[in-house]
Image (spheres, helix red, strand yellow):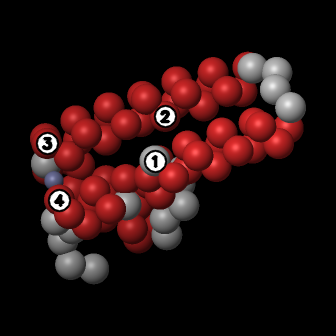
Amino acid sequence: MPEMDCTEAFKRLDDFLDRQLTSEEMEAVKLHLQKCQCCAEEFQFEESLIRSLRSKLAHIDLPCDLLQKMKNALDQL
Ligand SMILES: [Zn+2]
């Protein structure tokens, strides 16, 4: 697999955080993050944002369909 550039890494950000990439893609993204300070910071920022949102959602007692809609909306980010 050719080395991933910033654009490619960025496109995979959400899937990377959701662990929805193939293991090869995960590796390529990880490799890029180790080399690229700029992307690493962006990834860290998004990861903490998504984690805090998801953990908040997990603790709110909402009607199922509303919760699902919010999760879907988050997945679109
Ligand atoms: Zn980069």
Which numbered disc covers residue 77?
1
Which numbered disc covers residue 38?
3
Marks 1 and 3, how far apart in space?
A: 20 Å
Q: Nearer the viewer, residue 28 or 73?
A: 73
Would you say the residues marked 3 and 4 are in contact, meaning their CB atoms lie under 8 Å apart? yes
Mark 1 or mark 3: name the one nearer the start of the chain: 3
Q: What element carries label 3?
A: helix
**Amino acid type of the residue that numbered disc 3 sits on in the rendered structure:** Cys
**Amino acid type of the residue that numbered disc 4 sits on in the rendered structure:** Cys
Which quadrant would residue 10 be assigned to in this image?
Answer: bottom left
**Amino acid type of the residue that numbered disc 1 sits on in the rendered structure:** Leu
Query: Which class describes the residues within 10 Å of circle 3: few (<14), some (14-19), or many (20+)?
Result: few
Which numbered disc covers residue 6?
4
Q: Where is residue 24 in the image (x, y as percent from the top left)?
A: 41, 70
Query: Where 72 sits versus 50, above or below?
Result: below
Is label 4's Cβ within 8 Å of ligand 1? yes
Is label 3's Cβ within 8 Å of ligand 1? yes
Q: Which of 35 and 63 is in front in this view?
A: 63
Query: Where 65 sits versus 24, above or below?
Result: above
